[in-house]
Image (cartoon, rainbow, N blue to C red):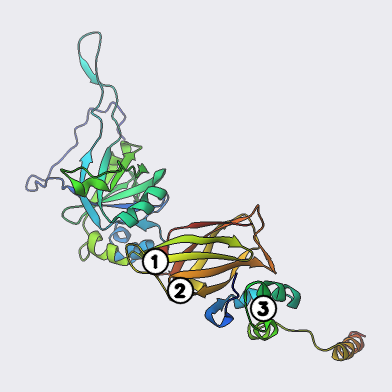
Amino acid sequence: MSNVCSVSLPGSINADCVAPMQKIKNVIILEPGTTFSSLSDFLNLSTWKAFVDTTLKAWIPVGLEGHENTTDDPEIQTSGQGGKFVANEPPPSLIAYLSMNFCDYKEVLNVLKGGTYEIIYELNDGSLYAYRAKGDNVIRGFKARINAVTKGFTDPAAIANFYRVMINHTSIDEFKNYVVAAPAAWTASLELVSYMPSGLNMMVTTPYSDPTVVVEIYDRCGDAKTGLVLADFEIVETNASTKVITGVTDNSDGTYDIDIDATGTGLTASEYSIIRVKKGAGPYTDLSNKVLVVGG
Amino acid sequence: MTKKDPKKTSFNKEVLSKYTPEQFQKYFEKRYSGDWKYWYKKLGGKLPESKKKEKISEKESTSTSE
């Protein structure tokens, strides 16, 4: 095993193969801890599909309009003898410009606020760029803090660059242990995007009044969404342990009356529930933003 | 708030059937029109039997346990 001061050179080469590293075509954001057990698992579409539409561990936008590599240059210091040495190796960072719409981006702004996720990049030739620790078969994404930060206005010279997401990786070491692998029969920006649940927007139109809150739901940038039933809603979080959704009335105009109750007692003033639409039984076909319902 | 037609509502049968009649009545009458007893039974709730029957049941129950 080589140590940090090893002077060994990398070793052999494949002289017939010169393949430039490709540009980034898309970003796939994973929940922390999401892993692929092996290379074949990593290239298996079924595994990915489940992450995208059933366990909801992977999120992929339609694509990228472009990206900027914002990684700092390493700090070069000069020693007392006049020689130079590398004092640090900054972790990679970039700004990704998503192909998106203003409705989806609003949700992205509300969600990506500096939390730590793991990212796998799709490159222009369809290959996937990920991290595999030394001596480990498990493949995962590169850890990063992600912030969606809007500048509020488009740049007149580059209006496609409005939907900005800043990706700041936390470790350079992961990038020294990368794996680039191309799925043989599928590409992320085609197949995985098609498995993404449709985004719905939900907002409260009449605040909670025991036992009912009225919400309005529509397809992002689209029409009012009708036809949802009780099974399509879920309480994501609550501080009222026994409260459940007991009834959902479709008013046929995109509004729904949702009852949150427990044995005849609704949410009290100090209680809240966060609800969302999650249509389907895995795979999910529609998924909405989360809405806070405060008792009263 | 205008009372809603329960026919247009999808109810949580599993939960509401476990409400006591009093609890369901309180829940239902807050916002739905119609006969709460009908909907309680439709959702799988069990209304108590008449008093006469209850007495008989109690007697039967007592004798059974003896």
Find residue A63 and report its horizontal and vertical position in percent.
23, 55
Badge nearest the viewer, 3 or 2: 2
* Chain that bears disc 1: A
Q: Is residue B44 above or below residue A220?
A: below
**For mark 1, does the 10 Å Cα neighbourhood hold few (<14), some (14 to 19), or many (20 or more) residues?**
some
Give the spatial CA distance, label 3 vs label 1: 31 Å
Report if the CB atoms under discs 2 and 1 are less than 8 Å apart: no
Find residue B29 and report its horizontal and vertical position in percent.
68, 75
Out of B9 and A178, give the one closest to the viewer.
Answer: B9
Residue receiving disc 2: A228
Q: Is residue A159 above or below residue A39?
A: above
Find residue B3 and report its horizontal and vertical position in percent.
60, 75
**Image point (74%, 75%), residue name:** B20
* Chain that bears disc 2: A
Which image quarter is the N terminus of chain A in?
A: top left
Tell me the amino acid under the disc marked 1.
Tyr
Report if the CB atoms under discs 3 and 2 are less than 8 Å apart: no
**For mark 2, does the 10 Å Cα neighbourhood hold few (<14), some (14 to 19), or many (20 or more) residues?**
some
Tell me the amino acid under the disc marked 3.
Ser
**For mark 3, does the 10 Å Cα neighbourhood hold few (<14), some (14 to 19), or many (20 or more) residues?**
some
* Chain that bears disc 3: B
Tell me the amino acid under the disc marked 2.
Leu
Question: For the residue labelled by badge 2, is the local secondary structure a helix, a strand or a loop?
Answer: loop
Question: Residue B17: which numbered mark, if any?
Answer: 3
**Image point (33%, 52%), residue name:** A105
**What is the tally of numbered marks visible in this picture?**
3
Residue receiving disc 1: A218
Find residue A119 and report its horizontal and vertical position in percent.
32, 48
Question: For the residue labelled by badge 3, is the local secondary structure a helix, a strand or a loop?
Answer: loop
